[in-house]
Amino acid sequence: MTTLRGAAASALPLAAFRFLTRSEARAAVEGAKVRWGFLVDTYKCVGCGFCVKACKLENEVPYDAPVTRTWVERYVILKDGRMLADTPLGARDGFTGMEVQGVQVRKREIAKAFFVPKLCNQCENPPCVQVCPVGATYQAPDGVVLIDRSWCIGCGYCIMACPYGVRFFHPVYRVAEKCTFCYHRISKGMKTACVDACPFGARQLANLKDPNDPVTRVILTQRVAVLKDEYGTKPQAYYIGLDENVR
Amino acid sequence: MRSHVLRPLWVVMGVVALILVARQFVVPEDFGIHERGFMYGYHRKSNEEEWKAFKVKYRTKDYCRDCHPDKYGENITSKHRIIQCENCHGPAVDHPDSPPKLSIDRSRSLCIRCHAYLPYPTSQRSEIKGIDPGEHNPDMECSMCHNPHKPDMG
């Protein structure tokens, strides 16, 4: 048996035993060292919408079209038990008034009120990727779910499959579109456009594989929650101060 | 076997062979199952690089510092230091080459993103000094009285 195996090994072409260049070796190691995640602190969010504005301009999402890769939701829970929620134009221009869903809310009626920024959760089990019939959407080795625009046929299965409603049709390219965690920025060592634009630190990018990353340490040691845990998608956007009313 | 059975079989085999040959030309070479396995990793590898090559437009405050030390210095000591220059002036992209000039947005709608007072108890919004935009000098630009780079009055 051993001789047989030895013979098989010697029969392998020499090309199978090639040396990696330094950059190839580094890439192989780094690929295993990065897993991108996100932390949202809903107490810090003030609903200014600068993140949405920055995202749209950075990622060339048509500014006036009612589509966006990230958005901010406002939740107002009244003392009589009613829950009001809205996100006008995805909060591109921020929240500037007391009117929610056509209701003029007064200060003394409010029990709870807060803002919840949303973006792609870059799930560990992304249901949007499973349903793609052509292999146009996929998860990169660092956990980010991307769309191959030249390969997408625009069938829309992934848009239906995402439980978080993160995907939409790009009105210009006519393919599925989604948050990429600003892949062009994070792969250069920058932060995402929304993280940079947030004046209050409500949005944070984390490398979940790095235990010394300060944001990862918050996720690992403080009380955080994820959206729609029951779906089993293992979302990787963590929230501080999530409420049961948030959907 | 009878020829009337064989003949359609040849046709089917021909079609299958044609599809397999066409596949060789249509499917890119780097298309396949990569790090994340068949369920999540079935893709064209070079698309990752295409996304990485996307143009960066927001350059952050560090990009502005060297050429605009006066504005930068004024801003960095004020409460508005937490706000990026580009939040109000728009993305720098390759400024000053392109665009040669960035916009100056003096509209009230920009300021009231944060400074329209909303009394939301569990949000930091209620802690920001705010106004009722309908009551507080509705016809004036905020910047006529408040310096947006250094808003601390006095």
Image (spheres, rainbow, N blue to C red):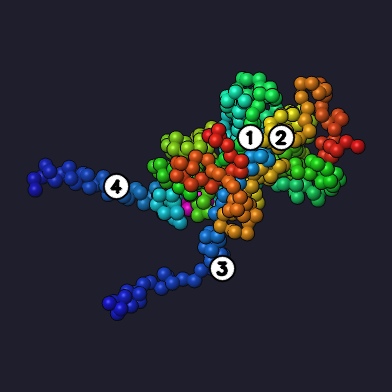
Kindly identify which residue carries mark 4.
B18
Query: How far across and how far down the image is residue B145, in percent?
Result: 87, 30
Residue A59: where, in percent of width, then height?
A: 61, 41
- Marks 4/2: CA–CA distance: 64 Å
Measured Cα–Cα span from mark 1 to mark 3: 46 Å
- Residue drawn 59% across the image and 47% down it: A223
Q: Name the side, left or right, on which A240 lies relative to A174.
A: right
In the picture of the structure, the residue carrying the numbered disc 3 is A22
Mark 3 and mark 1 in contact (Cβ < 8 Å)? no
Q: Are marks 4 and 3 on the same chain?
A: no
Residue that extends furthest to the front in the rendered view of this protein? A80
- The answer for which chain carries disc 1 is A
Query: Mark 3 packing: few (<14 Cα in 10 Å), some, or many (20+)?
Result: few
Q: Label 4 vs label 1: CA separation?
A: 56 Å
User: In the figure, residue A13 lies in which quadrant?
Assistant: bottom left
Part of the protein shown in magenta = B44-48
Chain letter for mark 4: B
Q: Earlier in the sequence, mark 4 or mark 2?
A: 4
